[in-house]
Amino acid sequence: MLVPGIASLLALADQRLPSGGHVHSGGIEQAITEGLVTEVAGLERFLERRLRTTGLVTAGLAAAATVLSASPQAPAHLAQLDAEADARTPSPAQRIASRAQGRGLLRTAKAAWAAPSTTLSWTDLGARPHHPVVLGCACAAGGVSAQGAALAAAYLSVSAPSTAAQRLLALDPVSVAAVTVRLGPAIEQIAAAALLSWGSPDSGQPESHPGTNRTKTAEAGHNIPAHTPPGPPIGATPPQQLDLTKADPAAVSTGPDQGAADVLDLALLPDDSDPLLDLLAERHAAREERLFAS
Amino acid sequence: MRPDLYLTDSAHGGARLGVPRPAALPHELPGEDPHEHLSGPGRLSGANGPLRVGIGGPVGSGKTALVAALCRVLGERLQLGVVTNDIYTTEDADFLRRNAVLPDERIVAVQTGCCPHTAIRDDITANLDAIDDLVERLEPLDLVLVESGGDNLTASFSKGLVDVQIFVVDVAGGDKVPRKGGPGVTTADLLVINKTDLAPLVGADLEVMAGDAHKVRGSQPVVLQSLREDPRASAVADWVLAQLDRTAAVSA
Ligand SMILES: Nc1nc2c(ncn2[C@@H]2O[C@H](COP(=O)(O)OP(=O)(O)O)[C@@H](O)[C@H]2O)c(=O)[nH]1
Ligand SMILES: [Mg+2]
């Protein structure tokens, strides 16, 4: 197999996956209403900005969910992760949107896979978990790596608003597709940065053979290869610079008998946010007439 | 369990090490609650939830008027809920609330992402969530009517969203509509040709319309009606009641 779980990953990143994404614009409906985005170039800047904040945060959460799904205490750890998602989503409207999409993805995931792992059932996640949490669990169910989960989350953070903008502004779909493709390297960088933020000691190294006696990190169950070497942040004015050198590998390598949440310090998950996106989400939710739920 | 196993190539990974792969046959997990999917795809209503009836058709054909009529007539003896898929969010729901055909909390409007037919046929999540919310809030419900946004003559409801669907066209749209067909006209469980009172005014031949409709629909039923003349939508209400009986019989 080329990449474990690649078919599941493709399905989970597919815009046509029936999980509610169709009615969520990721803030772009409001940005368009307020005249912030009027054409393809503006869309590209909006998408970059969303990728660096929402995309980075959801990539970190999704990857963490994939890893935690396999923990012996998975239900408790995922509840904790869901609370971390709340803490990283200050806008109530965005919380509602994330939980609405989590609920939708959960319905689809339930139909597709019996359970995320042997230690976790879908019902353990509750009725309305955050979208990246469900996404990470669905990745675990489909045999996708944490890296794949991060990639899917980062990709979805730009694909959702781009199709919404395409519909709202009747943009040329060929140009919009080209924008998404152009953002590809940035999406990969953000996914890698999300993994690195809570430590990826084997970053850049080839995957280990299963069963090989590994370092204490691997014993503890945390060996997430970040194959894409993180580069410097791209684009003009990111709301927050990512200091990718600050990732602390020691944070993930504690003793072998500890549960996943102990070795995966949730406080290290990315928590970047963009006040503009928060405000757009709130103003959108206050509107009477709108085409999208968020 | 070692999570890092999920990061390895399964060709020589989990299976050989005796680690169960998470992807397995559906419903083999112990403790899975069969009632959990209130509105899962392919489920026939009856035992687990309300009968879900889709009402589709072009804008202005009389879908909301039909929903209002059904609520008035059936609301007396059935527990009803309504979901509307407007192009702009709440117009139909507001109309229904204004006309007090049902208490406000029984009417939900969903956003349709600038594309209502996608919301009833492709990504039906927002509608399924709305139905689940209604059921959760108002249980037990007998019947949920889902009105489409009417943005597309070829729009039909997914079988994952509704159990049966009604397609409403109107006489004023011209007597060619049934002949032209399209999935709504040909495959809906009931075709309603509405506004027969307008036939003389628009020069539409009702016999031609009915004949063409039967031709493309085979044995599937067709109702010609005027809500002006029959505000109780008697024929459609009877048909809906028959569907309720049928699904009750199936699930009994
Ligand atoms: N003359 C006539 N008008 C009707 C009839 N049924 C509905 N209408 C009117 O047609 C218009 C559109 O109806 P509406 O239910 O809003 O259509 P929808 O867009 O399909 O929901 C309204 O003004 C209704 O009052 C009918 O049987 N005869
Ligand atoms: Mg209507």
Image (cartoon, coloured by chain):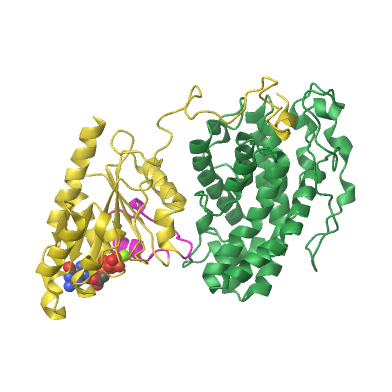
Chain colours: A green, B yellow
Asked if B81 appears above or below A52 in the picture, the reply is: above
**How far across and down, in percent of the image, does residue B183 sit?**
30, 59
| Residue A133 sits inside the magenta stretch | no
- Using residue B68 as the reference point, say whether residue A246 is left or right of it: right
- Using residue B212 as the reference point, say whether residue A53 is left or right of it: right
**How far across and down, in percent of the image, does residue B78 sit?**
22, 44
The answer to which quarter of the image holds residue A231 is bottom right
- Using residue B98 as the reference point, say whether residue A192 is left or right of it: right
Q: Residue at x 63, y 45 (%)?
A: A132
Q: Nearer the viewer, residue B27 or A213?
A: A213
Q: Quadrant of the C terminus of chain A?
A: bottom right
Q: Residue at x 71, y 33 (%)?
A: B9
Q: Is residue A251 visible?
A: yes
**How far across and down, in percent of the image, does residue A13 sit?**
61, 50
Q: Nearer the viewer, residue A20 or A290?
A: A20
Q: Quadrant of ligand 2?
A: bottom left
Q: Residue at x 10, y 78 (%)?
A: B200
The total number of labels drawn is 0
Q: Quadrant of the N terminus of chain A?
A: top right
Q: Nearer the viewer, residue B194 or B187?
A: B187
| Residue B107 sits inside the magenta stretch | yes
- Using residue B206 as the reference point, say whether residue A245 is left or right of it: right
**How far across and down, in percent of the image, does residue A229 sit?**
84, 49
Q: Is residue A271 visible?
A: no
Q: Which residues are magenta?
A: B89-114
Asked if B48 appears above or below B193 in the picture, the reply is: above
Q: Nearer the viewer, residue B186 or B145?
A: B186
The answer to which quarter of the image holds residue B87 is bottom left
